[in-house]
Image: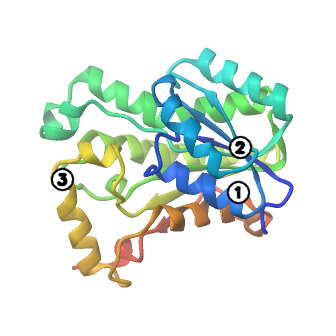
Amino acid sequence: MILQGKKVVIMGVRNKWSIAWGAACSAYKQGAEVICTCSEGSLEKVKPLLEEIPGATVYVCDDVSKDEDIENCFDEIKKNHGKVDGILHAIAHANTEDLRNDFILTSREGYAHAQDVSSYSLVAIARIARDKELLNENASIVAYTYYGSEKAIEGYNVMGVAKAALEASIRYLSRDLGKDGYRINGISAGPIKTLSAKGIKDFGSILDIVEERAPLHKNVTIEQVGDATAFLFSDLSSAITGEIIHVDNGFSVVGV
């Protein structure tokens, strides 16, 4: 088990279909102590899930656009668990109208909201975790992104722009965190049926296209993304930082 003796924080668990939940399950199977965070609204859905992971705990981090919410959450985690070896950022949000309408119609407020919650929150989480000395030596941070950061995907709109900023942030954070021996990477997961995906127009057609064109001719699962996350948490990836790894059955390498 590649995470034996490690403690990882999985931020952004919402329900059993969320990619973050796949990461939590994979981390547990690889021997990690799993610490989850979720919003206040998701807490009652997440608590029953943790029965499937012996020893797992959950803490509320209600609004990642507020530094004090992140600080309070990390204070509780450190008080009860000590330092951790990994943090997963699986957090994103955009207003529904900014996903449904043409990108050119994105409001200034909607643009700022998507950037704050989906991108800047990673910067805040990394900084606060470092400053509070929450991270163990050689700790690893992982964030989730999507191909819509690289190509204009219909219906992804402002979220694609936010994910592009997230990926650039990962590269710059790798320089800063590397000074303390910490790593940070991103996983660009293929499309998966999650609660968030329901907000994307014609999402089902995207799944069909991936299955048709991806070299492995199938869609990725939350378990597969979770396994890749466990690898990036582990010492097996000790020389990898600042990277965006595609876990999409090869779809991103296909031309036409």
Query: Mark 2 — residue?
Result: 56
Instruction: Say which label, 3 or 2, has the lower sequence index.
Output: 2
Front residue (pair 102, 207): 207
How many residues crowd mark 1 within 10 Å: few (<14), some (14–19), many (20+)? many
Q: Which element carries disc 1, helix, strand or loop?
A: helix
Front residue (pair 240, 197): 197
Disc 1 to disc 2, C-alpha distance: 9 Å
Residue 255, visible in the rendered structure: no
Disc 3 to disc 2, C-alpha distance: 38 Å
Quadrant of image for the N terminus:
bottom right
Instruction: Say which label, 1 or 2, has the lower sequence index.
Output: 1
Q: What's the residue at 59%, 55% (across, down)?
A: 23
- Tell me, yes or no, whether the two marked residues, 3 and 1, touch with CB atoms within 8 Å: no
Q: Amino acid at mark 3?
A: Glu
Position above or below: 209 against 141: below
Residue occupying the far top of the picture? 68
Labelled disc at residue 28: 1
Position above or below: 210 against 9: below
Q: Which element carries disc 2, helix, strand or loop?
A: loop
- Tell me, yes or no, whether the two marked residues, 3 and 2, touch with CB atoms within 8 Å: no
Q: Relative to residue 195, is residue 96 drawn left or right? A: left
Q: Which element carries disc 3, helix, strand or loop?
A: loop
Residue 199, visible in the rendered structure: yes
Q: What's the residue at 47%, 37% (across, down)?
A: 119
How many residues crowd mark 3 within 10 Å: few (<14), some (14–19), many (20+)? some
Labelled disc at residue 154: 3
